[in-house]
Amino acid sequence: MKLISIRLCNFRQFYGKTPEIFLASGKQNTTVFHGNNGSGKTTLMNAFTWVLYEKFSAAFAVNDKLVNKRALAEAEPGKAVGCWAEIIFEHHYKRYQAKRVCRGYKTGSEIEQSPSQLYLQIAGEDGRWTPPPPLQEPEDIINRILPRSLHQYFFFDGERIEQIVRDEQKAEIAEATKELLGVEVLNRAIKHLGEARKAFEIELNIIGNPETKKYLNDKKKLEKEVEKLTQIQTEIEQKLVHFSELKASYNHHLLELSGATELQKRRDNLEQQAQTVKQQIQQANQTIRQTLSSQGYGVFMEDSMTEFKQKIAELREQGKLQTGITKKFIQDLLQQQKCICGTEFTSDSVHYQHIQSWLEKAGTAEVEESLIRMTEQVEKLEQQMPKFWTEIDRQKAHLSQSREELSRIETELDTVIDKLRHFPNEDIQHLQKRLDETEAKINEFNREVGSNKQQIDILKKSIDQLDKQVDKQQMNQLKQALTQRRIAATQESIDCLTQVKNRLDKQFRSQLEKRVQNIFAKIAFKPYLPKLTDNYELRLLENTAGDELKVPASTGENQILSLSFIGGIIEGVREWSQKNTLMGPDTSTFPIVMDSPFGSLDVIYRRQIAHILPNLANQLLVLVTKTQWRDEVAEELQTRIGREYILTYNSPKPDCQEDDIELGGVHYPLVKHSPNEFEYTEIQEV
């Protein structure tokens, strides 16, 4: 999506029709809008999201009153006042015009606003504008170009951008990123294939034999149970997120209350220690399991190895195993009728009969080779067993030590919690009580999750067994056999698509993490490392003595982290969609529209962000105040600016303080006296 222009009419501060505002692209891809607070910067940014998605940012207050006040005041009672915004953009060499319209009505002292309506036109090769083809809704077309669920990553309030890294946003980030990946396409395909499989099974149920019908009916019941339990699991996981956030909030409040700070800090420290020790226990158990899996069989072979060595010794003692003398060697001597000492003999001589008797004692080359191999393997196993027991003993000692340490930590933790429960301050007692209740709920939900998972696993095994029973049924009719093949082919397709989806997700997440780290390193001066969890949750880590520890990020660092995430997504998806045009949004061009990107940042971060912003996306629209447009920002962006606009606020206040900004040696008004009793904003190109 490449933004060409935007135009407004009676939209909030903008009275009447604004001139068409053309937006920069190419090498000088940055468009800058200068305006004071309240002049309409946030309104302009929200005009994009209103037209395309009928969505508004958190800072856009009273979004049900969009019609300009002056236009309503000048209108006759009952007469509609049109309010609209129009965006022209290009996508895949096609030009689109998206226009959203609503109307305001003045009825006495009340103002009513009609629901909005989106209109979309597409320019043909001949330059004529026509509506989309039948059955293609404007909203669906825009969603295919840049999905609705992703709009907040391309049109956002810079002062609130750090919300992207908050914990409560992780599920939304994961889902939105899946859509960027094209995983949603695969999810829909898997869903549709599953529906097709059920349809085939219904058909098979109708035409199949009674035994097959019974298996399918039983399977259907089990699948409903799995679906029900899965839904319960989803609800519990949502509750777990909620209670985890509550727990964090209570802990934070306890830290803020005077008197309990040291106890709460000690509690947090003990909980972190307990978590570390639990991880050590888990790792030790995993090492024991791996060692047992790879080497444990040797324990059960000790008797067999002893018996093997005894048997070999007995055979050699009895002369039945003559190492080095083979039947082929004896046969050659008999054929040549000549002993190894040089003595010749005939077939009827005693010497011939003596040598011939060795044929029963001599072995074959294959036996010799096998004996050597088996002996080597037995010796290797014997050497391996002491190492095996040493490793097992070491890990068990480590387990014992860790469990003792965990017991000590938990005992001390119980003591600290008990002190908080009986603390003289009633507020602290109350918070601790709420915290205990929350932890009890979390434990209860975790137990329920485990129980449900076990039930789901058992049910799925039963379903697999029923699938195998259905497969074994003899299908006498051609139609039955065909339906069964269709079911098998559908399931195979589902399995393949599921594997592709999982690999796609893993690969993209890994690449996205590297891109986020690269962008963050270019901006931040602290040696922190961003990490992405499996749920696309952003964490900021610090390497201390070889251990990666989570660090509390400042507001500025969270803004940088969020910008890095957005930049990483855009860069990744741009590359991804160029290689996989069938998998995701069929575009490799993305804009960023950013309101107040430099608000709470210091000079270093402001300069770094200003330097990197034009490289994050194909187009950059920045809305800034005069204080945000300081020397370092102006210097970094100057060579990338393609277009520049001034938002001039007309104030009806008699004693309003006028303001202006100097750009290129010319003074442009930011605030001036209104020629009438209304407030409104004008747009002027620099």
Image (spheres, grey):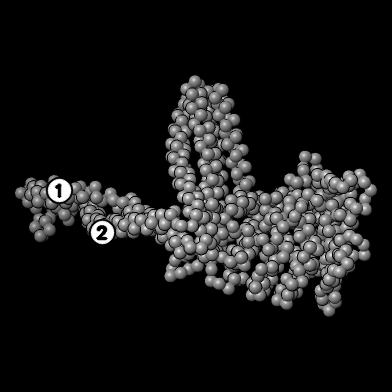
Q: Residue furthest right?
A: 76
Q: Secondary structure at mark 1?
A: helix
Q: Residue at x 91, y 44 (%)?
A: 78
Q: Secondary structure at mark 2?
A: helix
Q: Please, what is the three-letter code of the amino acid marked with disc 1?
A: Lys
Name the spot of residue 574 as percent of width and height, x first: 66, 59
- Residue 28 is left or right of residue 153, and the answer is right
* Nearer the observer, 241 or 643: 241
Q: Residue at x 85, y 68 (%)?
A: 656
**Label of residue 545 in the image:** none
Callout count: 2
Name the spot of residue 32 as percent of width and height, x first: 77, 67
Residue 464 seen in this snapshot: no
Q: Please, what is the three-letter code of the amino acid marked with disc 2?
A: Thr
The residue indicated by pointer 2 is 390
Q: Residue at x 35, y 53 (%)?
A: 285
The residue indicated by pointer 1 is 311
Question: What's the CA distance linking mark 2 and mark 1?
Answer: 29 Å
Q: Residue at x 77, y 65 (%)?
A: 37
Name the spot of residue 549 as percent of width and height, x first: 48, 64
Contact? badges 2 and 1 (CB < 8 Å): no
Residue 397 seen in this snapshot: yes
Q: Earlier in the sequence, mark 2 or mark 1?
A: 1
Query: Which is more foreground, mark 2 or mark 1?
Result: 2
Q: Residue furthest bottom?
A: 665
Classify 10 Å Cα crowding around label 1: few (below 14), some (14-19), many (20 and above): few
Quarter of the image that includes the C terminus? bottom right
